[in-house]
Amino acid sequence: MSDIPLPDNLHPETLAVRLASERSQYGENSEALYLTSGYVQPSAQVSADKFSGEEDGYTYGRAGNPTVSSFEMRLAALEGSEAAIATSSGMSSIMLMLFSLLKAGDHVVFSQSMFGSTIKLIGSEFARFGVESTMVPQTDLAAWQAAIRPNTKLLFAETPTNPLTDVCDIAALADMAHNAGALLCVDNCFATPILQKPMDMGCDIVMHSGTKYLDGQGRVMAGALCASHSLVNDKFLPVMKNAGMVLAPFNAWVVLKGLETLDIRMRAQSAKAHELATWLEQHPSVARVYYPGLQSHPQHALSMKQMSNMGGAVLSFDVKTTDPVKARERAFHVLDSLQVMSLCTNLGDTKTLLTHPASTSHGKLSEEQRQVAGIGQGLIRVAVGLEHVDDMKNDLQRGLA
Ligand SMILES: *Cc1c(COP(=O)(O)O)cnc(C)c1O
């Protein structure tokens, strides 16, 4: 769809503020919100040409919307992909990808530390339709290689992961996928294109939950896939038109405006997370901090190289004690003592959000499965927002002291 004419070679920060669908005849400076499910056609012939694909243009909300197109163009510009397709949530973008690329008998290799619903969607739901899959340890390249079979079509990684911030080598996985004739998808939710551009490292598809940092203020659900024109137009769009997991125009507008401040938010939140992680690491009541920006992180060097020398805005820490019952009590005490920050299952908000993974996102696992995953009862995840770091420290100190 046509966009506002802009000079070539603008920087991503500029495109994040400027790139959008054409202005309407009213010349609005802030992008218009087109709340419409249908589009009036000037003639029966034009309508026929649009439906047959001979002419560009909007026909019906499930096939496209100018506000949604604006969001897709901006996100593609930030990720450095040829195109993007927006969906109703992060999970529906994964569903769209799997539906579009796989059939019964195909095989997927994915990391065992991915987002919980991603594991369920591939390992349980798509398994019902004959899609095979193998889970591998996130950081073990040899295990990824060993899991590849002749019918492997997709490698799927998330980096850094939730909540332990494991990092994997995107360029190495891209090579591995391509040597096997498969595609690599990276869930870039935690790093965002401000820290990490998987397309530049050879990745084929970047997946986003727009619910997180792209919106950035915890308001709406959204998702997207960034990829080549051919993947978006020939694979994803035809399935989208029939399956209908479209992003609502209002939500697209919110996330579109969120992208305008993504760069400054990510830099500020990452810097605050680094300061908080450094403080926590020295705290006598804290056993361990998980944060890619710290020297103590097992993949610190790779993280800094891959994530523009930033650690991101999510960190986790273990309260100090070896007794699992006490650990849970202590973690709960820290969370129940908060007066400023929120106990809230989300991330990517300007408000700092804390969770207890063992009783929420990883609550359905057995204690043994949790041990294997490294999710202890004393683990707390902090998705750092924009409050003053001293206020964050004081809020945690209440429960840690
Ligand atoms: C939240 C999240 C998702 C799912 O996105 P929704 O918008 O909640 O559907 C996928 N991956 C990661 C890493 C997430 O944090």
Image (cartoon, rainbow, N blue to C red):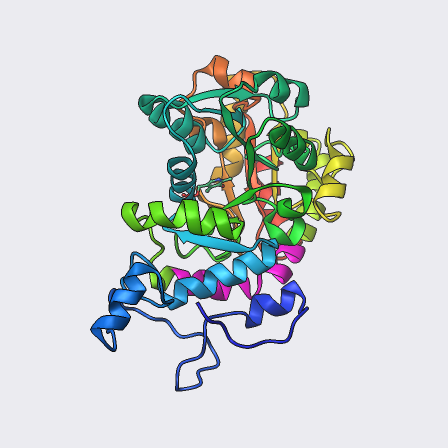
Residue 224 in view in this figure: no
Q: Please tell me which residue is depicted at 44% across the width and 44% down the height of the picture.
A: 344
**Which residue is more in the foreground, 237 or 110?**
237
Expressed as whole percent of the image width and height from the top left, the position of residue 306 reads 71, 42
Is residue 142 shown left or right of residue 353? right
The image quadrant where one finds the C terminus is top right
Q: Please tell me which residue is depicted at 27% across the width and 68% down the height of the picture.
A: 36
Q: Which residues are magenta?
A: 252-269
Which SS type dominates the magenta stretch? helix
Q: Residue furthest left?
A: 44
**Which residue is more in the foreground, 339 or 89?**
89
- Quarter location, residue 26: bottom left
**Is residue 16 a member of the stretch shown in magenta?**
no
Vertical position of residue 393 compared to residue 168: above or below:
below
Expressed as whole percent of the image width and height from the top left, the position of residue 256 reads 47, 64
Expressed as whole percent of the image width and height from the top left, the position of residue 57 reads 35, 68
Residue 266 in view in this figure: yes
How many numbered dots are placed on residues in this image? 0
**Which residue is more in the foreground, 105 or 170?**
105
**Is residue 260 a member of the stretch shown in magenta?**
yes
Q: Residue furthest top?
A: 368
Q: Residue furthest bottom?
A: 26
The image quadrant where one finds the N terminus is bottom left
Expressed as whole percent of the image width and height from the top left, the position of residue 242 reads 28, 47
Is residue 245 shown left or right of residue 210? left
Q: Please tell me which residue is depicted at 44% across the width and 32% down the height of the picture.
A: 118
